[in-house]
């Protein structure tokens, strides 16, 4: 017996998310304050309406804490690598280096906030593009709140096939299409919709920078880069889905230097009254450590890229290092409605030696050692770095633990499934238009495209079969919607706000990103509906 899919149960299941959004958007609460309230509501709903007991809540909540830990061990070293670079005043040098690469301010922003963060999403993911992109944008004069919004826009499209396609593989495993011709069919639908996400993201960054004037100046670069990103990924997905995003982002990273030398972008150009920019940062000169070269300033990020590529792409090394896994055993849990969460001997095992957090930690420590030995970090620098890390990460730790405990309890007690099933029951054949929104919901609730595919992949497949809809289209829309969800994922938003030093302003970020996410999802929805139902 499953929970009844009734209006009352649907409303109860929606309460945790609705209250979370209300507190963040209407009352301007930060996630650190809103998440515990959302968690309390999710627990209350689970016990009162979904027949969960305290034993189950405790065990599933513990799983949520473990989920949060796998993210936090990325956030903590990500802040370390930022603080080390900042303490050495290396961002000043990087800013000057970007201006030497191209005098066009908009192309500088696109290069960091779209092209480079997409590259990072291609190889690492798990919040690294946000943690790295935010301080780099601030370093070239972007206001902190926009320095959070831009990478959220820029990296979202690579959520499905990025991180060497971990989210894509989770969808294939859930639906049983690994290595089949059907996988290629789904990939065509997914990459087509994702290409649209990519293009709109680039165009939106130009619009936010300077309205119509910014869009006209940036559009040639956006079109060229988007063809490489989106078109390249679509083609590569038919041959090697694991490397589809990584290779296309590598090519774009190399090609952006050619764009910077082109006639259109090599001359100095900026919109002086752009609300996106803080001219006090951009016009500030380098007063300290002027002997740091551009490549020295970027050393921690070179180390991060090199370590990541070495460990992830050298299969024997990855296999050896990945063989050490840690995790916890959990017994079976069940609700009074018969929702069963099977027992597991090793719940979501973590491989520390192949984890993105380890790569960040090594890169941060290497950067600190190099800068200290060269005299770029003075006495007491390590203590100052440690204090700033604790100050920045304490609130975000509370928020992420609360949110992931909330999402785990909602999922394990059937609340998330009722949300999706009830909506599908109402829409019937028109469910095709809803499928991208289901993927979006999954990523918003879990802060992970991969988790969204795990949570809703099989459900979307089953619904498509019941309603006799094209499975490839529905599953492609699921993971595309999941990618769009990266725009509004609470975990990424908190990470960005933490790195930018504006923790507590997540609601302001969400007010900018939510309309874009809903708009792109609506366009994908219309496309899927027109092709499947009308055509």
Image (spheres, rainbow, N blue to C red):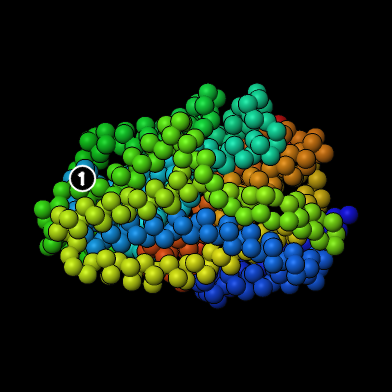
Q: Can residue 376 be spotted in the picture?
A: yes
Q: Residue at 25% of width from left, 47% of height from top? A: 299
Q: Residue at 59% of width from left, 52% of height from top? A: 327
Q: Position of residue 234 (x, y in %)?
A: 52, 30
Please tell me which residue lies in front, 180 or 519.
180
Please tell me which residue lies in front, 333 or 100.
333
The relative height of residue 380 versus residue 449 in the rendered view (above or below) is below
Of helix, strand and loop, which one carries label 1?
helix
Please tell me which residue lies in front, 133 or 88.
88
Q: Position of residue 446 (x, y in %)?
A: 60, 56
Q: Residue furthest right?
A: 1
Q: Position of residue 477 (x, y in %)?
A: 64, 41
Q: Residue at 69% of width from left, 63% of height from top? A: 59
User: How many residues crowd mark 1 within 10 Å: few (<14), some (14–19), many (20+)?
Assistant: some
> Mark 1 — residue?
295
The relative height of residue 84 versus residue 437 in the rendered view (above or below) is below
- 9 left or right of 257? right
Please tell me which residue lies in front, 342 or 306.
342
């Amino acid at each position: 017996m499953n929970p009844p899919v009734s209006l009352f149960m649907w409303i109860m299941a929606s309460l945790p998310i609705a209250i979370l959004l209300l507190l963040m958007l209407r009352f301007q609460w930060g996630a650190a304050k809103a998440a515990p309230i959302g968690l309390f509501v999710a627990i209350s709903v689970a016990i009162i309406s979904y027949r969960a007991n305290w034993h189950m809540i405790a065990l599933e909540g513990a799983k949520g804490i473990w989920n949060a830990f796998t993210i936090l061990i990325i956030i903590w070293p990500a802040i370390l690598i930022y603080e080390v670079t900042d303490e050495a005043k290396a961002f000043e040098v990087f800013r000057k280096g970007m201006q030497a690469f191209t005098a066009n301010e908009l192309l500088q922003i696109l290069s960091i906030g779209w092209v480079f963060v997409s590259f990072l999403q291609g190889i690492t993911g798990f919040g690294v593009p946000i943690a790295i992109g935010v301080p780099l944008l601030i370093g070239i004069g972007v206001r902190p709140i926009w320095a959070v919004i831009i990478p959220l826009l820029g990296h979202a499209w690579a959520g499905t096939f990025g991180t060497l396609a971990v989210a894509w593989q989770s969808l294939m495993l859930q639906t049983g299409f690994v290595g089949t011709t059907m996988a290629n069919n789904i990939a065509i639908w997914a990459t087509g919709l994702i290409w649209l996400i990519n293009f709109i993201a680039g165009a939106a960054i130009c619009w936010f920078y300077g309205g119509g004037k910014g869009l006209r100046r940036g559009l040639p670069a956006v079109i060229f880069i988007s063809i490489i990103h989106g078109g390249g990924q679509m083609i590569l997905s038919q041959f090697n889905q694991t490397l589809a995003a990584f290779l296309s982002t590598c090519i774009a990273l190399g090609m952006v230097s050619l764009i910077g030398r082109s006639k259109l972008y090599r001359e100095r150009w900026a919109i002086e009254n752009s609300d996106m920019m803080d001219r006090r940062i951009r016009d500030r000169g380098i007063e300290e450590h002027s002997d740091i070269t551009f490549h020295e300033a970027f050393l921690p990020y070179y180390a991060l890229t090199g370590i990541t590529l070495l460990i992830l792409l050298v299969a024997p090394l990855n296999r050896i290092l990945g063989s050490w896994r840690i995790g916890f055993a959990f017994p079976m849990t069940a609700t009074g409605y018969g929702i069963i969460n099977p027992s597991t001997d090793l719940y979501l095992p973590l491989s520390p030696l192949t984890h993105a957090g380890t790569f960040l930690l090594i890169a941060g420590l290497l950067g600190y050692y190099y800068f200290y030995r060269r005299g770029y970090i003075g006495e007491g620098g390590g203590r100052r770095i440690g204090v700033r890390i604790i100050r920045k990460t304490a609130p975000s730790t509370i928020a992420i633990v609360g949110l992931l405990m909330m999402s785990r309890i909602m999922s394990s007690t059937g609340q998330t499934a009722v949300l999706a099933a009830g909506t599908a029951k109402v829409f019937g054949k028109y469910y095709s238009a809803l499928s991208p929104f289901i993927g979006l919901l999954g990523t918003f609730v879990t802060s992970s495209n991969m988790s969204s595919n795990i949570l809703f992949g099989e459900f979307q497949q089953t619904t498509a079969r019941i309603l006799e809809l094209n499975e490839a289209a529905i599953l492609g829309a699921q993971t595309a919607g999941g990618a769009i969800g990266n725009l509004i994922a609470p975990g990424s938003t908190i990470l960005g706000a933490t790195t930018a030093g504006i923790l507590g302003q997540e609601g302001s970020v969400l007010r900018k990103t939510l309309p874009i996410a809903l708009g792109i999802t609506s366009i994908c929805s219309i496309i899927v509906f027109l092709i499947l139902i009308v055509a």
